[in-house]
Each structure stands twice: as C-alpha cells, then as structure tokens.
C-alpha cells in the first residue's frame, strides 16, 4: 500500500481524495497532514498548491498532494482567483464572499458574466514536482440558487447543465464534471506511475 499525504488538516477532504482516487489507482492510502501550515503567498493556484505540497513532503517524507482552487471571473481579469476564499476580507466566509462578488457584478450584463472554476493539484514525490489543472466553465447568475454545494456554487451556472447552478445539480453529477473531477482525472495517471 502506497501512502500519500494530503496537505490539509481537513479529514473530510482526505476522504474525498481517497474515494475519488481509489477508482483509478489501486493500493493507495491518502493520509492527512498534521504538521505546521505554510504561508500561501503564491500568485497562482499552481504556486499555492506547490507551496503546500512541498511543505507536507518535507515534513513527512512521504509523497504529497495539495490543491488550490477558486472562481475566476472574465470581466474582472480572473479575480477573485487565488483570493476566492477571502474575497470579502474574512477567510472562509462563504456568504460574505458570494455577496460581495454579486454586488461587484450588479451592473454587468448577462453577456459579460462569463466565469470558470479552476482547481490545481500539485504532486511532490521523490524530488519531482507535477501540477495538473481542471477547469469548469460557465457564467454567473444574478442571485444565489440551490442548496447543494458550498462557496460560490449557488451563483455559478456551469455550461451544459441547462441553466442550473452548481448548487442545484446533484452531488454525484458535480463530482463527475466539476473542476476538481477534471483535475483528478489528470492526476490519476501520475499517481499510478509512482513506484510502489
């Protein structure tokens, strides 16, 4: 069994990674990270994911995974981007972040409300570093809709979902088509190639 540390203290996220990756990689155990947190001061999702993965790999001696993700609005030059979780100034305040973004786009016509979710996963193992990215394109609604999901899901209208928000589609559907699902699909062959 190969052990890979996930650079998070969030046991729920570790279980999610384990479940998704087990479909494509046999004999893989995802473990949570119990060490100190690095400063995420990268300017891109890839930089932040690598900072976390390098830190966890150095601290544990295990191959390490880390992810960074957020929403990128076309008319805002890709913002909030890496600042998605703290857009309102308070880290992790989903409702305040979502409301601020809606307020900032209040006068923007529907034709210019294009956006995408982006997820980058970094893998650091044996001195090698890899990053993979998943992108989920769509546009932003004018008001929150739906009870599934979290973060910006209630205002994100993904392409190909008939106008439903990411918080209105089923969790199963979301886990199959989201930015994270696409990043995981690109990550699986990298993990499968690691020496056992």
Image (cartoon, grey):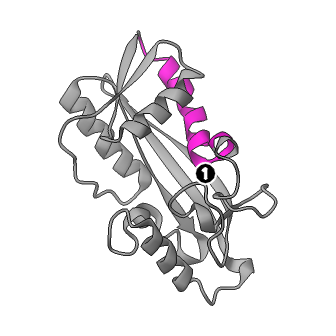
Query: Residue 134 versus residue 166: which sits nearer the camera?
Result: 166
Q: Residue 111, how many percent across, how many down?
A: 74, 79
Q: Which residues are magenta?
A: 175-195
In the picture as drawn, the residue positioned furthest to the bottom comes out as 107
The secondary structure that dominates the magenta segment is: helix
Q: Residue 163, how many percent across, how many down?
A: 78, 64
Q: Locate residue 58 relative to residue 176 in the image: left or right.
A: left
Q: Residue 69, how many percent across, how many down?
A: 47, 53
Residue at x 49%, y 58% (from the top left corner): 70
Secondary structure found at label 1 = strand
19 shown above or below 92: above
Q: Is residue 16 magenta?
A: no
Instruction: Please give the count of numbered marks on the rendered protein.
Output: 1
Q: Locate residue 99 relative to residue 139 in the image: left or right.
A: left
42 shown above or below 4: below
103 shown above or below 115: below
In the picture as drawn, the residue positioned furthest to the right comes out as 162
Give the quadrant of the C terminus.
top left
Give the image quarter of residue 194. top left
Residue at x 64%, y 77% (from the top left corner): 143
Q: Locate residue 135 relative to residue 30 in the image: left or right.
A: right
Residue at x 45%, y 66% (from the top left corner): 94
Q: Is residue 181 magenta?
A: yes
Q: Residue 105, how many percent across, how many down?
A: 58, 83
Q: Residues within 10 Å of mark 1 (few under 14, many from 20)?
A: some
Give the image quarter of residue 149. bottom right
Q: Locate residue 11 relative to residue 137 in the image: left or right.
A: left
Whether residue 122 is visible here, answered yes or no, is no
Give the quadrant of the N terminus.
top left
Whether residue 72 is visible here, answered yes or no, is yes
* Residue that mark 1 sits on: 135
């Amino acid at each position: 069994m190969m052990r890979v540390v996930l650079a998070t203290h969030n046991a729920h996220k570790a279980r999610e990674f384990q479940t998704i990756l087990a479909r494509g990689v046999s004999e893989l155990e995802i473990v949570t990270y119990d060490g100190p947190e690095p400063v995420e001061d990268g300017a891109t999702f890839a930089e932040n994911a690598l900072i976390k993965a390098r830190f966890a790999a150095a601290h544990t001696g295990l191959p390490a995974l880390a992810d960074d993700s957020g929403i990128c609005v076309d008319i805002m030059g890709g913002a909030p981007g890496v600042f998605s979780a703290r857009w309102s100034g308070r880290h992790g305040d989903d409702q305040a972040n979502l409301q601020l973004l809606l307020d900032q786009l209040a006068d923007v016509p529907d034709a210019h409300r294009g956006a995408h979710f982006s997820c980058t996963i970094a893998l650091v193992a044996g001195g090698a570093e890899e990053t993979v990215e998943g992108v989920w394109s769509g546009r932003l609604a004018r008001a929150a809709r739906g009870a599934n999901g979290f973060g910006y899901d209630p205002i994100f209208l993904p392409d190909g979902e008939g106008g439903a928000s990411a918080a209105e589609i089923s969790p199963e559907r979301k886990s199959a088509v989201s930015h994270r699902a696409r990043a995981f699909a690109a990550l699986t062959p990298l993990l499968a190639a690691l020496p056992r």
